Amino acid sequence: MGEKRSNHTVYNVKYHFVWCPEYRHQILGVIEDSLESSFREVCDVYNYEILSLHISSDHVHLFLSAHPKYSPSEIVRTVKSITAREMWQQHETLLQEYLWGGGFWEESYYVGTAGDVSTDTTEQYIERTEHV
């Protein structure tokens, strides 16, 4: 079922995130390689497992698994802030043409959860299982 284990937790938590650069400028394709590398480094450091990553010219899809001690807002804040700082360090001249004020990502984002079973299956399991 894709479960992971830590000292006191068994979990299967997966998040699908989507977000855009400020003003939805189509700049990500130009810096895609360094941005992907930055995503992978951040996720390695924080033990977020990247299940899928797609960088379009004007938005990012990141599908990952993380320990439940990390909230989705904490994950997205961490990944966005570190990757933004690294992109400014690596591509300042390019980014100054499109972005101002030191920003990189829009504040907003999408997050959805995913698992190996459907909502209906989970509800049926809970309703049909004897709880002692």
Image (cartoon, rainbow, N blue to C red):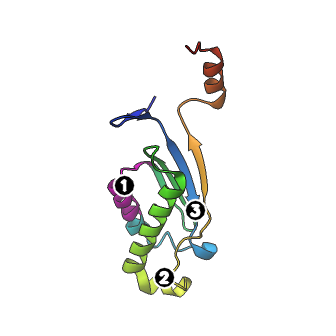
Tell whether label 2 touches label 1 (CB within 8 Å): no
Q: Which residue corresponds to mark 3? A: 19
Residue sitting at 49 percent across and 86 percent down?
A: 96
Q: Position of residue 94 (x, y in %)?
A: 46, 83
Q: Residue furthest front?
A: 132
Q: Disc 2 marks which amino acid?
A: Leu
Question: Image quadrant for the C terminus?
Answer: top right
The kind of secondary structure element at disc 2 is: helix
| Range covered by the magenta-colored residues | 36-51
* On screen, residue 129 above or below 17: above
Q: Callout 1, which amino acid?
A: Tyr
Q: Which mark, residue 95?
A: 2
- Mark 1: few/some/many CA within 10 Å (<14, 14-19, 20+): some
What separation in Å lies between label 3 and label 1 (alpha carbons)? 19 Å
Location of residue 19 with respect to 48 vertically, above or below: below
Q: Earlier in the sequence, mark 2 or mark 3?
A: 3
| Label 1: element kind | loop
Q: Is 2 or 11 nearer to us in this picture?
A: 11
Q: The residue under label 3 is which amino acid type?
A: Trp
> Would you place residue 81 above or below residue 10 in this image?
below
Q: Which residue is pictured at 53% across the width and 32% down the height?
A: 116
Please state the horizontal and vertical placement of residue 98, each as a whole percent of the image: 55, 83
List the residue tagged with mark 1: 46
* Image x and y of residue 55, in percent: 50, 61
Q: Rounded to the nearest whole Å, what is the CA distance between mark 1 and mark 2?
A: 26 Å
Tell me which numbered mark, 3 or 1, is placed earlier along the sequence: 3
